[in-house]
Image: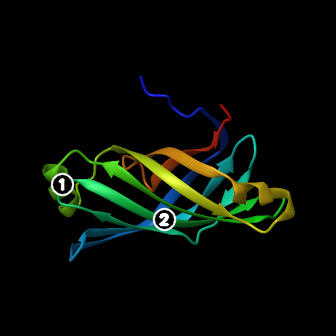
Amino acid sequence: MMDLNPFKYEHIFSYTVTIQRLDLIKNSPFGMRVMGYVGGGEVLGPKVKGKVLPFGADWGIITTDGVVHVDVRLTLETDDNAIIYMQYAGTVDLGGPEEYENYRAEKFPAKSYIQIIPIIETDHPKYLWLNRLSYFGIGRVDFSIVPVSLKYDVYAFYSLPD
């Protein structure tokens, strides 16, 4: 049996965003480019509360095997006016080449599920601890409602001593 390194994780916040516009570049040399522009959102959680400002976007690429590689930049503003920048990469497994072709035809699944690795930065004294952590997030996109909505849960994870 392998001797795995001990760790723990902790929920930091959850957030929702709406997509105000979705553009596709269907024949990019890298796959199909999907650009979703953020219309704003809400941040709720035990450690951070506030809103998602309406300035960010996802500049993802979908490969012909049906995998979305997300590339997101967002700005959060806390209830006490701290500005937090968050970028993340991640993946959505649409299922395969058929789902890729459905996206090209602008036939989106009702829901998709996302795994992300955020990087967070701020200079606000109350939230400097955010700069020192590593994160993962679990999310879902809901195409069945207008505007399109996404919800994420963001967790910090920590190595523990033996």
- Horizontally, residue 117 falls left or right of residue 78, namely left
- Find residue 6 and report its horizontal and vertical position in percent: 59, 32
Q: Which mark is residue 156?
A: none
Kindly identify which residue carries mark 1. 65
Q: Amino acid at mark 1?
A: Asp
Q: Which of pointers 1 and 2 lies earlier in the amino acid sequence?
A: 1
Q: As drawn, is 131 to the left or to the right of 114?
A: right
Q: CA distance from mark 1 to mark 2?
A: 21 Å
In this rendering, position of residue 39 left or right of residue 65:
right
Q: Quadrant location of residue 29?
A: bottom left
Q: Residue 83, image x and y in percent? A: 74, 67
Give SS at disc 2: strand
Q: Is residue 110 above or below residue 18?
A: above
Q: Position of residue 121 (x, y in %)?
A: 68, 65
Look at mark 2 in the image and give the residue it sits on. Answer: 72
Local SS, label 1:
loop
Q: Is residue 117 above or below residue 77?
A: above
The residue sitting at 59% across, 68% down in the picture is 54
In front here: 126 or 112?
126
